[in-house]
Amino acid sequence: MKIAIQRLAHGEDLPLPAYGTAGAAGLDLLAAVESDLVLKPGDVVAVPSGIAIAIPRGFEAQVRPRSGLAFKNGVTVLNAPGTIDSDYRGEVKAILINHGREAFAISRGMKIAQLVIARHEEIEWAESASLDDTARGTGGFGSTGTHVPKSTSEKTGGSN
C-alpha cells in the first residue's frame, strides 16, 4: 500500500518514517524539534514529526510508544495508541509523557514513537432492548481474576 506523505518545512532534512527491521510493524517517528527539548518528570509535550500523511479511508495510523524509551527512561505516548484518522491532514505529533525520575532530553531526529497503519471497520449501531448472554456476562474490571487457575495435575501433584 502506498500512502501520501508530505514533509513540512521544519522536517525537510529528516528521513521519512521507516521500519527499523524487516519484521517491524511500526515505522519510527522522528522528532522535528528545532533544539533539544527537556521533558521533566511528569511533563507532557506534543512533539512534532515534521510530516503530514493522507491515510486512506478504512485505515488509521496509530502513534505508539517505543519500548526502549518506556523501559529505559519512563517516556511513553500518553494517549497510546494515539489515532490519526483518515480525514486528518495536519502534522503528525506524538504526545509524550515522562513517567521517569529523571529529566529526558529529546533531540532533533531522535526516534520518539512508532507509527502503525491499521485497518478498521466502520459500523452502524443496531439498537437492541437486550444483548446475547456470554459466560462473562456483566462482570467488569477484574472479574476474570488475576491469575490463571492451576491445572488439575498441579493441584494433585501429578505430572503431565
Image (cartoon, rainbow, N blue to C red):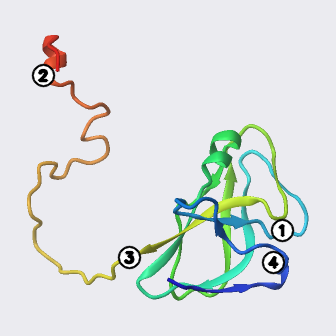
- The image position of residue 125, as x and y in percent, is 24, 81
Tell me where residue 11 sits by quadrant. bottom right
Residue at the front extreme?
Answer: 22
The relative height of residue 21 versus residue 3 in the rendered view (above or below) is above
* Cα gap from disc 3 to disc 4, whole angstroms: 29 Å
Reading the image, the residue beneath label 3 is: 120
Tell me where residue 95 sits by quadrant. bottom right
Specify the quadrant that holds the C terminus. Answer: top left
Tell me where residue 106 sits by quadrant. bottom right
- Crowd band around label 4 with a 10 angstrom C-alpha radius: few (<14), some (14–19), many (20+): many
* Cα gap from disc 2 to disc 4, whole angstroms: 59 Å
Element marked by disc 4: helix
N-terminal of the pair, mark 3 or mark 4, is 4
Residue 85 horizontal side relative to residue 18, left or right: left
Element marked by disc 3: loop
* Pointers 3 and 4 in contact (C-beta within 8 Å): no
Reading the image, the residue beneath label 2 is: 152
- The image position of residue 6, as x and y in percent, is 70, 87
- Crowd band around label 3 with a 10 angstrom C-alpha radius: few (<14), some (14–19), many (20+): few
Q: Amino acid at mark 3?
A: His
N-terminal of the pair, mark 4 or mark 1, is 4
Reading the image, the residue beneath label 1 is: 33
Q: Amino acid at mark 1?
A: Val
Front residue (pair 128, 104) = 104
Q: Residue at x 21, y 24 (%)?
A: 150
Q: Amino acid at mark 2?
A: Thr
- The image position of residue 138, as x and y in percent, is 19, 52
Q: Amino acid at mark 4?
A: Gly
Q: Residue at x 76, y 73 (%)?
A: 15
Reading the image, the residue beneath label 4 is: 11
